Amino acid sequence: MRASLFNVPVPLSGCDEVFVMNTFTDAQALVSQDVADLLDRLRREDVTFESATAEEREAITALSADGFIVDTHERERADVRAHLTSLKEDTAQLRVTVLTTLQCNFACDYCVQGDHGDVPAGQRMTLETAARTMQWIEKRLDTVRPESFVLTFFGGEPLLNLPVVYQMAEQAAAACKARNVRMLINIITNGLLLTPEVVDRLMPFGLNGVKITLDGAKELHDKSRPLRGGQGTFDRIVKNISNVAGKCRVAIGGNFEDGAGESFIELLDFLKSQDFAPFLDKVAFKPVIRQKPTTPKGFIPLTAVGDASSGCGSSARIASTPKTNACDTCHFVDEQMIALREATSAHGFRTVDGVHMGPCELHRQHAHTIGPDGVLFACPGFAGDAHQAVGDIRGTDNDRFRRAAAEFAKITSWRESCGDCSYVPVCGGGCSVAAHAEQGSMHAASCHKTSFEAGVAAFARAFANDAANQPPSPA
Ligand code: SF4
Ligand code: SF4
């Protein structure tokens, strides 16, 4: 009998209680210092059930029920391995992210491509490729037989290719209906072309939500996300949000740079004052990671746009694409980001909790990213790098695809690098795209443990507040 490897204790200031969260079972509890000490002794094997007092045995029984105490660590490690494997093989959901185009109408200053010129043919999906992609998706639906299908449109700016969006949404909705599969459509967009007409057209096919990027308050946003002609985009995007909020779920993302905290607080104040504020589904900012001198050529290690609920939006993007993309799963966090997350909650917006961040969709066998030319990638972060392509919708079988697919299949960074870290069940070793860029290996861990620690600390404060505000139980 041992204390779980995945317990994270947080002593609460000003009282004698300790918040404990188990990242594997997701159990959370406020315990007395005595019980926290008992868990510590169990971890060190200083006490057994037999040597425990009657009071301690009672506590042990209760804590075991929630997974805070386990039989053996070997068994627990095996359970976590089995959990991560079952996640990989999970067939409940089929997820496909389609990059309708790599073109973009913005000229974001952090976009590595820089010239923002016209992209070559093949970087905009044709209707024919869209139709073939749907045939491929239908085969996957028949093979995987999921309960739900999540289709995410991404780019570049996906709404620059509306004919493909409409055609695929309509055909996918029909395919799902015929198979009795629930369908959800997400769009990750810069928001400029998001009109009520687009939303109305997609709602009957299962539009679930749109995610729009605002990089701080107007002045900063206009500077960092201008049109290719240099004009600001903030006002038009806000107007578009106002026009569609209430029709569908709208999430706001933002690319946060060091020192931009004030502008983001100003943005939060602004959003809170808008009539559409109650309709915002989520607000979550991510740091921009500038390209390091050591970063492989063509890598765009930005982060910021996706939908955490779908695993990854995705961000860190390898390739010479003209548009920066961002991932919502991997959080490159520093103290400013943690403070911003807390400010977002304090403004009344739902945001990421900093704990339930992964493992990301790279670890899911039934999550695919499809480029505009029909090439398949393991996750959106690797899209565009031909060396990382794992296949295509035509079923082409070649050594390069096979090698890349085999490489992705064996990614288990947490096994090689993370030991008994308490966050393995919710992290899985972090973003492989970031690891590939920063450390030269997608098999390395990309560790942002401080982010998880800050997330659990925030849970602890919220839990303690809730407990303090409970009405006294009747005598
Ligand atoms: S990457 Fe870091 S936080 Fe994640 S499981 Fe590994 S050691 Fe823990
Ligand atoms: S590897 Fe990184 S970019 Fe890819 S899905 Fe995971 S968190 Fe997102």
Image (spheres, grey):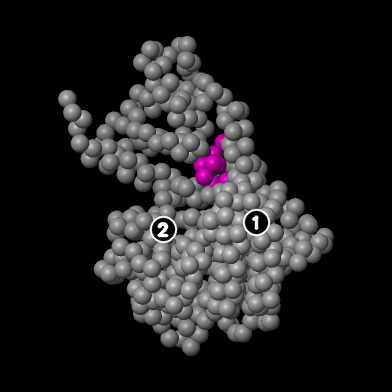
* Residue occupying the point 52% across, 26% down: 70
Residue 122, image x, y percentages: 69, 78
Q: Report the span colored magenta.
A: 420-430
Q: Residue at x 38, y 68 (%)?
A: 247
Q: Choose top left, top right, bottom left or bottom right for residue 225.
A: bottom left
Q: Quadrant of ligand 1?
A: top right
**Is any part of residue 378 visible from this angle?**
no
Mark 2 vs ligand 1: CB below 8 Å: no
- Is residue 250 rendered to the left or right of residue 181? left
Secondary structure mostly taken by the magenta-highlighted segment of the chain? loop
Residue 213 badge? none
The total of numbered circles placed on residues is 2
Assess disc 2: are there few (<14), some (14-19) or many (≥20) residues with their C-alpha within 10 Å of its C-alpha: many
Mark 2, residue position: 337
Q: Is residue 192 left or right of residue 55?
A: right
Q: Amino acid at mark 2?
A: Met
Q: Position of residue 45 (x, y in %)?
A: 51, 20
Q: Residue furthest left?
A: 475
| Residue 449 in sight in this render | yes
Determine which residue is flagged by label 1.
Answer: 141
- Is residue 365 inside the magenta stretch? no
Compared to residue 413, the image places residue 67 above or below, namely: above
Q: Residue at x 58, y 46 (%)?
A: 428
Element type at marker 2? helix
Name which residue type carries label 1.
Answer: Leu
